[in-house]
Image: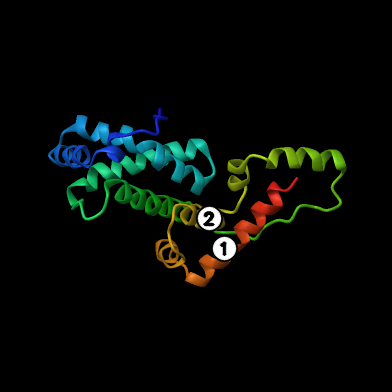
Amino acid sequence: MLPTSEASPLTTDNGAIDDAVRRAQQGDIAAFETIYHASAPAVYRLCRRMVGDDCEARELVQDVFVRAWEKLPTFRNQSALGTWLHRLAANLVIQHLRSAGRRATRFIEVDPDMSAPTRAVAIDSRLDADAAIARLPDGARSVLALHLEGYSHDEIAQMMGIAAGTARTQLFRARRALMHLLEA
């Protein structure tokens, strides 16, 4: 189960961060558990945005922290631990999407001839932003999630192994699709 608290010792006390990291790098499982509980909600939000599925996102969070435990000795404190974990999570999700053979697909436009009751149901289901984002193709959803997390087009392109222009195009299409999905 993922913690839901927004407050965390990792975001409020740099000394606590450094201490927990040092102890976890030396094999202290309790220190790593502290890191997990403090940062798992943010990692989950990123994974959820990128894959669009709660269950899959939860599994990916576990994978991220397994990878973090393995790679923690290489963490050199040159960036914030949260930034390091965020980048690790984004890379792992992108790798997951690639290995699953998922490729970005073209957007499917809503049928304008749809009956009024069917259209009303469709509009109701579109009100939830997370649900709308989950309906985006994998590539567009990943680009949008990374953009929302503050990555530049060039960083997104590098992480996803695509051209910066492709990242911009996917972001444009994702925004356009979201506007279409969320309009009432």
Residue 104 in the image: x percent, y percent? 57, 59
Residue 107 in the image: x percent, y percent? 67, 58
Q: Quadrant of residue 29?
A: top left
Q: How is the image coloured?
A: rainbow
Q: Quadrant of the C terminus?
A: top right
Residue 2 in the image: x percent, y percent? 40, 30
Residue drawn at (51%, 65%) of the image: 167
Q: Which residue is mark 1?
A: 170
* C-alpha span from label 2 to label 1: 8 Å
Q: Of residues 169 and 99, which is closer to you in this image? A: 169
Q: Secondary structure at mark 1?
A: helix
Counting the numbered discs, the total is 2
Lateral position of residue 118 relative to residue 4, left or right: right
Relative to 153, is 83 above or below?
Answer: above
Q: Secondary structure at mark 2?
A: helix
Residue 105 in the image: x percent, y percent? 61, 59
Q: Which residue is mark 2?
A: 144
Amino acid type assigned to the residue bearing label 1 in the image? Gln
For marks 2 and 1, the one nearer the N-term is 2
| Furthest-top residue in this view | 1
* Neighbourhood count class around disc 1 (C-alpha, 10 Å): few under 14, some 14–19, many 20 upward: many
